[in-house]
Image (spheres, helix red, strand yellow):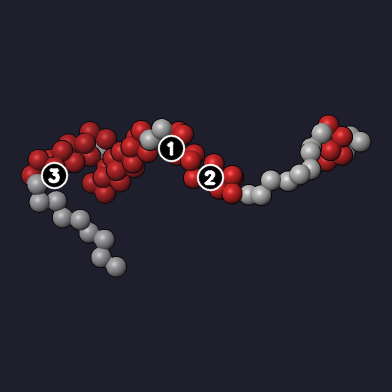
Amino acid sequence: MDMAFSVKDESTDAAVRRLAKLKNQTLTDTIREAVEHEYQRSRAAVPLIDRLRPLTERYRAFPQSPLQADKAFFDDLSGDA
């Protein structure tokens, strides 16, 4: 499997090399770290409500139970009954 990247832009190449030298890292480690940081930053930019929407929709798809949970129910679960 070929996983090589070829950077054909001189300013991009120079920027990666400057950062790698500053951090005393390999080019690969520098690129990986930069991409991971940007991914995390971009992901965090999506509002929490939007990130939770699929989970909320999945939760709401479950059928509702007619049973009510009360203190006795939870006491029984925890062995306090």
Whole-number angstrom distance, CA of label 1 to CA of label 2? 11 Å
Whole-number angstrom distance, CA of label 3 to CA of label 1? 36 Å
Residue 31, position in %: x, y? 26, 45
Mark 1 surroundings: few (<14), some (14-19) or many (≥20) residues within 10 A: few
Nearer-the-camera pick, 39 or 6: 39
Q: Are marks 2 and 3 in contact (CB under 8 Å)?
A: no
At 79% from the left edge and 43% from the top edge, which residue is drawn? 67
Q: Are marks 3 and 1 in contact (CB under 8 Å)?
A: no
Q: Which residue is mark 1?
A: 50
- The mark that comes first in sequence, 1 or 2, is 1
At 79% from the left edge and 38% from the top edge, which residue is drawn? 68
Q: Which residue is mark 3?
A: 13
Residue 79, position in %: x, y? 88, 38
Q: Secondary structure at mark 3?
A: helix
Nearer-the-camera pick, 54 or 30: 54
Question: In the image, which is nearer the foreground, mark 1 or mark 2?
Answer: 2
Q: Which residue is mark 2?
A: 57
